[in-house]
Image (tube, helix red, strand yellow):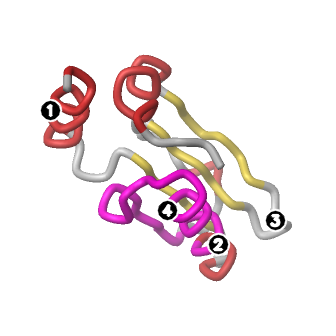
Amino acid sequence: MKYIISFFITINAYAFPLRIFHENGSERAEIVRNILIKGYGVPGDLIVTKNIQSCDEVVKKGKFDLCLKNNGDLLVVSVDREFVNDSLKIFQAP
C-alpha cells in the first residue's frame, strides 16, 4: 500500500514521468512504448512520445527520459533512480 500511495503522489507531480523522444522514428518509438506497456505493465497514460530533430536538444531532464536516434540507437537521457526505486518498482519485468 505504501508503494501505491508513493506512486500516485509522484505521478500527480509529473504528468508524464516516462518520456520517449525520437528523431523522426515514431514507429520505433511506439514499439518501445508498447514494450513498456505490455512487457512491464506500465500504464500507457504515464508514457508520452515526442518527435524532436536531435537527441542532443533534450536539455530539460525528466524522471525517466529515453531518446531513439534515427539509426535505431536507444539512449537513456535521464533517470531519477529514486523515482525508479520508489515508484516504478511496482511494475514487473517480463
Q: Residues within 10 Å of mark 2 (few under 14, many from 20)?
A: few
Residue sitting farthest toward the front? 1
Q: CA distance from mark 4 to mark 1?
A: 20 Å
- The answer to which quarter of the image holds residue 26 is bottom right
Look at discs 3 and 1 and give the one toward the viewer: 1
Judging by the rendered image, the residue that carries numbered circle 2 is: 31
At label 3, which amino acid type do we have?
A: Gly
- The answer to which quarter of the image holds residue 2 is top left
Judging by the rendered image, the residue that carries numbered circle 3 is: 72
Q: Residues within 10 Å of mark 3 (few under 14, many from 20)?
A: few
Which circle marks residue 37 in the picture? 4
Q: Residue at x 74, y 62 (%)?
A: 69
Q: Residue at x 45, y 28 (%)?
A: 84
Look at discs 4 and 1 and give the one toward the viewer: 4
At label 1, which amino acid type do we have?
A: Ile
Judging by the rendered image, the residue that carries numbered circle 1 is: 9
Q: Residue at x 61, y 43 (%)?
A: 93
Magenta stretch in the rendered image: 30-51
Q: Is residue 70 above or below residue 74?
A: below
At label 2, which amino acid type do we have?
A: Ile
Q: Are marks 3 and 1 in contact (CB under 8 Å)?
A: no
Q: Is residue 27 magenta?
A: no
